[in-house]
Image (cartoon, rainbow, N blue to C red):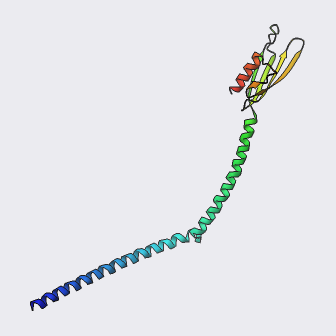
Amino acid sequence: MSGLNAAFTTDFLISFALVAVILVMLGLIFNLYSELSTIKTRYKRMMSGAEGSSIEQMLAEHTSEVKEAVGEYRKIQGKLDTLEELMRNSLARVAVIHFDAFEKTGQGLSWCVAILDRNNNGVIFSSICGQEAERSYVKPIEDGRVAANYKLTKEEEQALRQAMGR
């Protein structure tokens, strides 16, 4: 009988262990089902989005808005490039020098004006004033230098240096 008792005890222990494993598995399944239910609820809430629209609709709308914004950015960038080109070519550097062309006049009535763009292109206007007459000159400037067929006076050179330094 002791063999029967031992077999009964072994069978009982195996059955008990199997029932315990099944209960633990059922507990895990219930826990997983509960977590899955929570995740589904969160997912449905997230996908419904604000004001009844879904995230997919919101993303489509935002994508459309981003495309419009990029188009506007490109237009503005083109206008900015145009403005920068205009600024580079606009007259922006000016220097004025007054001087006495003749020693006896002493009033500093002669003058020269250098007007340049940001690329150091422009003109120098000069007016030499004397007691009897006044003479005016215009000399073109390219890349900060006067053309070979013109010569600058020291006052014109000074005005050119001052204008380029601004």
Q: Quadrant of residue 148?
A: top right
Q: Is residue 125 above or below residue 105?
A: below
Residue at the (29%, 81%) spot, across then down: 23
- Residue that lies at the very extreme toward the left in this rendered image: 2
Residue 104 position in % (x across, y down): 82, 7
Q: Residue at x 13, y 87 (%)?
A: 6
Q: Position of residue 73 (x, y in %)?
A: 67, 52
Q: Is residue 155 visible?
A: yes
In the image, taking residue 109 as reference, residue 6 lies left or right, namely: left
Asked whether, in this view, residue 47 is left or right of residue 13, the answer is right
| Image quarter hosting the C terminus | top right
Q: Image quadrant for the N terminus?
A: bottom left
Q: Is residue 131 above or below residue 39?
A: above
On the image, the x and y values in percent for residue 135 come to: 87, 18
Camera-nearest residue between 28 and 109: 28
Q: Which residue is painted at 63% across and 58% down in the image?
A: 66
| Viewer-closest of 166 and 5 | 5
In-front residue for pair 166/148: 148
Residue positioned 52% across, 69% down in the render: 46
Q: Quadrant of residue 108?
A: top right
Q: Quadrant of residue 153?
A: top right
Q: Residue furthest right?
A: 132
